[in-house]
Amino acid sequence: MKSFYLLVICCLAATPLFAQRTDTLHIIPHNKTLMVTDPSRGVNESLKWAVFPSKSTPYRKITAHITLQCPDGMKCGAWDYIDAVILRRTGSVHGEDKKQELVRILTPYGGWFDNKWRFTWRQDVTDWGVALRDSVEIEYQHTGYEANTVGWLATVDFEVITGTPVMEPLDYQPLWSKSFAYGDTARPFPTLLTPQTVTVPGDAKYMNYRINQTGHGMDRPDNCSEFCDKWREVYVDGKMIDHRQMLIVCGNNPVYPQAGTWVYSRANWCPGSLSIPDIYTLPVTKHEHSFDLKMEPYVSKNPQGGWFITANVFFYKSPSAKNDVALERIITPSADDEYGRMNPACANPRILIKNNGGKPLEKLTIEYGFRRSKKQTYTWKGYLSLLQTTEVELPGALAFTKDKETFEVKLLNPNGKKDEFPADNVGWSQAVKPPVYARDMVLTMMTNRDSTQTSWTIYDAAGVKVYQRRSDSLRSSTLYTDTLRLHDGCYMLLIEDTDNDGLNFWANPRGGYGYIRLFDMDKKLVKNFDPNFGTSMIHYFAVSANAPAITPETVFEFFPARTKNRTMADIVVDRPQTIELRFVDEKNVVQWEQKINNFTSRMFPIDMSFLPPSFYWVTLKLEDGREVTRSIRKVEN
């Protein structure tokens, strides 16, 4: 098959999450593949062949790394479309076209992203190891109807860890894979998604019931299925095993801010995220099992929405080990894109652990700390059944001695026993030192009109509140100034908004404009917090009597960021100086330039009535050559 496209990196060394030597393959069927829409069809595909190990090579774990970035000389895609990584044919071009969705991606509103933007998500796809063997055709599918002059560069990297499987895989059976109408009396949901009965392989002892489900479309009266909060029930053999509401909060999305309505809660998905599958690990108890899924009864006045559901059941032999724990991820401190909201961090590390053993995990010893430094020890107690995961917060502050450190974690003695597969018990991450501030600072908060929604709290490394501004103590459109006097150590500033739309959200101009900023005692701005933060923002910082000098930050914000004629520009600079503003439209044409002499920090009006409607990149240039770019949209009158 000379036409196959293949990029494989083979390593016989430690990966970032494993300390012992283990075989790792990076199989990359799509490497910065340009994906644009096909408006004539609403879908565009890129199919590439790749070569996975043969069936004689056991898989320990497979992780799909999905990276999107802006193409050179082209804007990122502007809309939240459904993308997918799909398993097509195996063996050869004459193989069966399986059309099985491996990963579902919901693209971000990329209108504000510049050409340096990129983001990587990860998802465990080990269940699909039973099919990812030898020659495999992988499709990247991009949907949507926007102009094909914008798009994405898509990279799909399958990280394959070989070794003793957690459970030996046997086979899988597709259950459903389509969009199901919702609220349509002519096509009731229960008649479209019908129960499926599956014959179990003879050696199977366990099964993973894996469901990817997202709601799309808007109707009346409840804006279903994208924005409605309806329950779902999952059944096996007629018995309900799960009941939950499908609406999830999107305001803590790690991809932020975005150009669209990224903060709105949605039906089991968020713009700029992967669809997280629900996986139910269950014992096999008989020769056949039936599977069903039910939605809350609903009748629509104008049915337009539906549920996009793919579901499969995977069969396995018994677990290979009784006592086997794995370190899945280091959340803080970490440089991973997905944990950007919580990093850099200097206290209370957070990790994700998983029980891969046949016995429930009830006790575990955890060692952690920086490389070549004394480690701390923590004893975790809880209850994790087979393949369950949990986040663990580890106590204590992290004493940085340089700007970047290697943070290490080691899991020991699950249930007081020797781990039967220790290769995945040790991991490390890149830890970046948080900023170090002087002991005395000033925190200013300008409330917006929705003053009862936003609050802030400062905690020390022990989790004790040291300063706080509660939302019920604030008045609208009011400036609050608090002098902070702190002892040396690590602190966390938590900013929260109960309406999930921060202090400045373009789709809520009635909510007004606000901000939170940190100044030193000389009134120099040391930290500006993006007011378009959604649900919450975490900022770790250290305090020291010997804090280094900090280069003052520059503020450049618009309110509103979508206007017919006029907007307000909020600019904060460290000293009076000449500034320049340059407005560049979406065709990369400079439409307006303005120079202001002897400018001092303030909010001031900008009249855009003479500019044509367009999306604009606006660059603020300072005397020292520094530039800050923001976006604004001029709409039709």
Image (cartoon, rainbow, N blue to C red):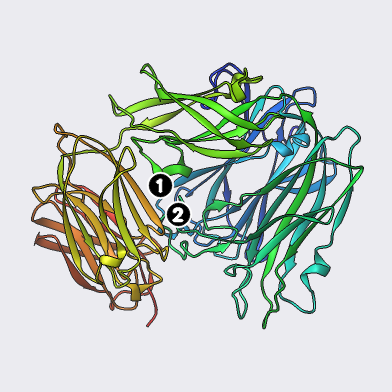
Q: Residue at x 61, y 52 (%)?
A: 275
Q: Residue 311: in sight, yes or no?
A: yes
Q: Position of residue 86 (x, y in %)?
A: 71, 47
549 relative position to 632: left or right: left
Separation of marks 2 and 1 at Cα, in angstroms: 8 Å
Query: Quick one: quadrant of the C terminus?
Result: bottom left
Are dots 2 and 1 in contact, CB under 8 Å? yes
- Is residue 350 rendered to the left or right of residue 480? right
**Mark 2 or 1, nearer chain start:** 2
x and y percentages locating residue 241 in the rendered image: 73, 53
Crowding near pointer 2: few (<14 within 10 Å), some, many (20+)?
some
The quarter of the image holding the N terminus is top right
Measured as percent of width and height from the top left, residue 232 is found at 69, 62
**Residue 213 appears at what percent x and percent y?**
67, 57
Residue 226, placed above or below residue 492: below
- Residue designated by label 1: 341
Query: Does residue 425 lie above or below 174 as drawn?
Result: above
